Amino acid sequence: MVETIQWTGDGVVMIDQTRLPREEVYVTCRDYREVADAIRTMVIRGAPAIGVAAAMGVALGALRSQNLHAEFETICETLAKTRPTAVNLFWAIERMRRLYRSMNGRPAAEIRKRLVEEAIEIRREDIAINEAIGRHGADLIPDGKTALTHCNAGALATAGFGTALGVIRAAVAAGKKIDVFADETRPFLQGARLTVWELMRDGIPATLITDNMAGHFLKSGRIGCVVVGADRIAANGDVANKVGTYGVAVLAHENGVPFYVAAPISTLDLSLACGDQIPIEERPAQEVTHVFGTQVAPDGVRVANPAFDVTPHRYVTAIITERGVARPPFAETLRKLAG
Ligand code: MRU
């Protein structure tokens, strides 16, 4: 399995997801600002992976700080300002903050050591959580059919194993004969560059399609289910995920295909009543006007580039978490799972 992010003596090491699949290059962040840049520029991306990176960024910032108490909040704030939609980012920073506050009065060296241990623990837990999501979700994947996914909710989007792809991996490990259709996922091409790369490495049959082919195949009868990840899930079960997910969900509903969302409990944001309240990141226009540095649109064109959309809960068949599977009414079942 690919190593997405690791804590090392030199700093935080990440596989550079902007260069996959053509180059397998690892970058080392030696300063928390470099971790923040890596999140912003999507060297590392995917909600759980962003959370792990942020935790490691806080630990790195603390470790390298001259004056921990004077710098701690700036470190947290800098990392929190990188990407607004994935709630795992804020969840991880808050967990690090809580630990820091709980150690009030302890020697700085001890606090630094504990913060590093906590970040390493968040990474370890994330892999275990994804494996549990896989165990809960594997039963839902129909045998002998194709599963369709959007974006990359795989090992690369997490500390390892993946959420949506974790469910697929677990279903394959359970002996199911399934293959995967991966939407290419314009404009950043996570499906084309990352999802099929990951699946091919694992020997899981994968077919790459462009986003606008999803309806055609959902109507054809060969797709047994859709399984995607999430960046933030509101209390009523509305799901923010990579832009384009909403369209896939509507098409799945129209064609009677179950639509599953696989996500850790840390992706739930029960403080938000519904998906309208989820902040949607707007990314640079150049991601739309250019493809791998080549301009494909006229100079000066106006561009919209929301990185995520919100799928209303009525299109979601079930939400698969490490604590079990939530089904409608999500307002009740999610609250119960969150505990
Ligand atoms: O912009 P990205 O690549 O960070 O968006 C990623 C997604 O939308 C994923 O589906 C989501 O974060 C879940 S990853 C397990």
Image (cartoon, rainbow, N blue to C red):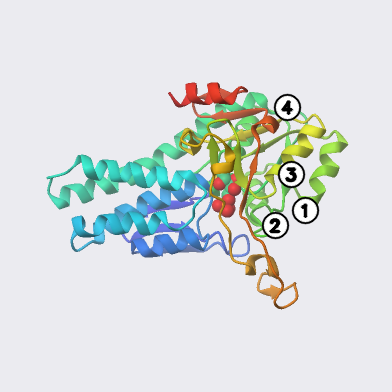
* Vertical order, 132 against 56 (above or below): above
Q: Position of residue 273 (x, y in %)?
A: 53, 34
Q: Nearer the viewer, residue 27 or 275?
A: 275
Q: What type is the residue that disc 2 sits on?
A: Arg
Q: Earlier in the sequence, mark 1 or mark 4?
A: 4
Q: Quadrant of residue 225 in the image?
A: top right
The residue tagged 2 is: 186
Q: Nearer the viewer, mark 3 or mark 2?
A: 3
Q: Nearer the viewer, residue 178 or 231?
A: 231
Q: Nearer the viewer, mark 1 or mark 3?
A: 3
* Vertical order, 28 against 99 (above or below): below
Residue at horizontal 24%, vertical 45%? Answer: 100
Q: Earlier in the sequence, mark 1 or mark 3?
A: 1
Q: Position of residue 40 (x, y in %)?
A: 49, 61
Q: Nearer the viewer, mark 1 or mark 4?
A: 1
Residue pushed farthest bottom? Answer: 299
The residue tagged 4 is: 142
Q: Secondary structure at mark 2?
A: loop
Q: Secondary structure at mark 4?
A: loop
Quadrant in which the C terminus appears: top left
Q: Position of residue 185 (x, y in %)?
A: 69, 53
Residue at horizontal 65%, vertical 46%? Answer: 199
Badge number at residue 210: 1
Q: Position of residue 124 (x, y in %)?
A: 40, 40
The residue tagged 3 is: 247
Residue at horizontal 64%, vertical 23%? Answer: 139
Q: What type is the residue that disc 1 sits on?
A: Thr
Tell me the CA gap for discs 1 and 4.
23 Å
